[in-house]
Image (tube, rainbow, N blue to C red):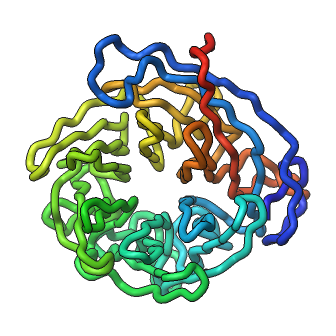
Amino acid sequence: MREPLKSIHRHSMTRACLPLIVSLVMGLLVSQPAAVGAERANNAGFAPRLTVTNLTRVFHNGEHNAFTDLIRFRDRFYLAFRSCPDGHSVHSTASIIVLSSANGREWQQVHRFSVKNRDTRDPHFLVFKDRLFVYTGTWYAGPTAPAATDLDLNLHLGYAAWSEDGVKWNGPVMLEGTFGHYVWRATSFRGKAYLCGRRKIEFAVGPKGEGREVESLMLESDDGLTWRKRAVFQEIDGDETAFVFEPDGTVVGVGRRPGTAQLLRSSPPYDKWTRLDLGCSIGGPLLVRWGDRYLVGGRHTTRDRGPKTVFWWLVGDRLEQCAELPSGGDNSYPGFVELGQNSALISYYSSHELDSAGRPMTAIYLANIHLSPGPPVAP
């Protein structure tokens, strides 16, 4: 269901929804022309303005709902996110919810799963070998919520649920080769599946949590269920990494770090990487190729307004901000589905609205974004 933003009624979902008649013609923070003569595909003349419309709260059930992903499979849209009655932190009460829609406006729950004694979070989709996979990284939580100082990355484990038709689901099953790895975004290329997986360097037994001594890897699979190391995205301060393959096999990635994010590039056999500082923090990064450009999304902490969900164009080796979504507090982790050359559907979560009791709610949102073909406007 898509719930109009002006409503603050709390319910899990309805089949018939009134799309929000709010057209946020944002044209926000528009990019400047790309450098003349730039060779990369995303520098196609200029970075166009981006407008946002039909912003809608699509799910809120009174729990903490977060960490979205979005995909199209067999002519339907699928939206995944984590829902937990106990909040953002690690809890074994967390579960992954999958919704489905024929039109992107009316949604139904088609699957929900959890893993005993584990916190399921950060679901990510992958269509691979005619199956729709949902991957989740899981912290070991035990029967009660552990203190943050007791979390152990070495006990992390990836799981997957999958479906061949989007109706009947299998799993969750443990992903072989992911013990001690926090799995994240997935993609496929030339008959192989790939995941981001971060882990402690040499699985060091030391301070709990994560810390700096973490590397992020590119994991590879033949079947989407059994995984092996293929390459190293980040050798230290490894974190959430979104990545895509260019047609020649070149990998382009955006990697989160404790400070500023990195732009990552490598070509086969992926043993040498360039890692460039992007100059801003990006939490829960998204990287997609939209036409001949790269779009980046994620949480950016502003100087005076707190964290916001923001989109940028990747122009050469720099970011040009093109939109800021209505957001605040705990937010980000966007998903993206291209609808056409100039339009797309996006998902994200945010805590900027209040429920009927006046308390912040962490809910799931959808919006349409559009490219404007004309020249960019001044910010």
Q: Position of residue 374 (x, y in %)?
A: 61, 18
Q: Is residue 201 left or right of residue 256?
A: left
Counting every numbered tag in the picture gives 0
Q: Position of residue 236 (x, y in %)?
A: 21, 48
**Depth check, front residue: 250 or 284:** 250
Q: Splitting the image into 4 quarters, where does residue 303 fall?
A: top right
**Depth check, front residue: 147 or 52:** 52
Query: Relative to 13, does residue 336 appear above or below in the rendering?
Result: above
Q: Position of residue 132 (x, y in %)?
A: 47, 74
Image quadrant where one finds the N terminus: bottom right
Query: Relative to 287, does residue 173 appear above or below in the rendering?
Result: below
Tell me if I can see residue 116 in this picture.
no
Query: For the point 49% across and 22% down, which residue is it?
Result: 47
Query: For the point 66% across and 24% down, which residue is it?
Result: 27
Image quadrant where one finds the C terminus: top right
**Depth check, front residue: 156 or 269:** 269
Query: For the point 60% across and 49% down, which residue is it?
Result: 339
Q: Position of residue 46 (x, y in %)?
A: 46, 18
**Depth check, front residue: 281 or 36:** 36
Query: For the point 27% across and 72% down, which residue is it?
Result: 180
Query: Relative to 345, does residue 38 appear above or below in the rendering?
Result: above
Q: Is residue 314 left or right of residue 4?
A: left
Q: Splitting the image into 4 quarters, where does residue 371 fall?
A: top right
